[in-house]
Amino acid sequence: NAGVMQNPRHLVRRRGQEARLRCSPMKGHSHVYWYRQLPEEGLKFMVYLQKENIIDESGMPKERFSAEFPKEGPSILRIQQVVRGDSAAYFCASSLGAGGVGEQYFGPGTRLTVT
Amino acid sequence: QQQVKQSPQSLIVQKGGISIINCAYENTAFDYFPWYQQFPGKGPALLIAIRPDVSEKKEGRFTISFNKSAKQFSLHIMDSQPGDSATYFCAASRREGAQKLVFGQGTRLTINP
């Protein structure tokens, strides 16, 4: 009964490169959320997706960031032309149904370092 | 309106003592309040959650107390153990619409043996 899986666990990118973060939700879960955690801070919501649909992207920066959750395969958070300020831990969570129906379970995170 | 304020920022408790962490919210539309535990280098793990139709929920040594009129809720850890040393986050969300979690700033709890 695997939990939420994220890869890679650690990612180092130079400024200007692209970062791709992957998230496989728990079995049977069709709702995916992405959060970002800066050092010594709480988690901040970025985007909420269901299969093939972006439901809420109100926490996503307007430029360089995008997310998808295709019909087949993992959810992908993509950061283009990374800058030092993108260095953070990125967590994916999944739920069985929407919020009140299903609790959100988090993956181990991807720690992105931009040099 | 979307904020959840958490205190204290850090807390040191002796083994066997009671750890208490407090949170306050402003948005009265919030109707789901979970607590997460996070160890260094790991993802947050759901600990316990409450809905506003009850004032208290207990699971083992962990209890959530909820005060709807004051818009406050707290986590109590009874008989605190060194293994409880972690960062704790409160959160809130709405059941309707996009159910994004709004997190507090976190409390770093240290249990001294």
Image: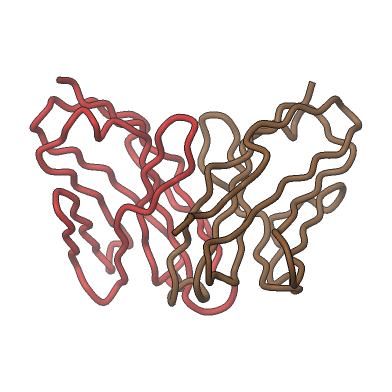
Chain colours: A brown, B red
Residue B112 position, x and y percent, is: 18, 21
Q: Nearer the viewer, residue B88 or B22?
A: B88
Residue located at (63% from left, 43% from top): A90
- The quadrant of the picture occupied by the C terminus of chain B is top left
Q: Position of residue A22 (x, y in %)?
A: 70, 50
Residue A50: x %, y % from top left: 66, 72
Camera-side residue: B47 or A7? Answer: A7
Looking at the image, how many numbered discs can be counted on the residues? 0
Give the camera-side residue of B24 and A114: A114
Q: Quadrant of residue A102?
A: bottom left
Q: Compared to A51, does A13 lie above or below? A: above
Q: Is residue B71 left or right of residue A107?
A: left
Q: Relative to B63, is A101 above or below?
A: below
Q: Position of residue A14 (x, y in %)?
A: 85, 25
Query: Does residue A58 sit above or below B90 in this rendering?
Result: below
Q: Residue at x 26, y 77 (%)?
A: B53
Q: Quadrant of residue A94?
A: bottom right
Horizontally, residue B33 falls left or right of residue B2, namely: left
Name the foreground residue: A104 vs B52. A104
Residue, x 18% and y 44% (percent of image)?
B77
Q: Which residue in the rendered view is the most extreme toward the front?
A: A1
Q: Compared with residue B15, is residue A109 higher up or lower down, i.e. above or below?
A: below
Judge left or right: residue B2 versus residue B90. right
Q: Residue at 61% of width from left, 63% of height from top? A: A32
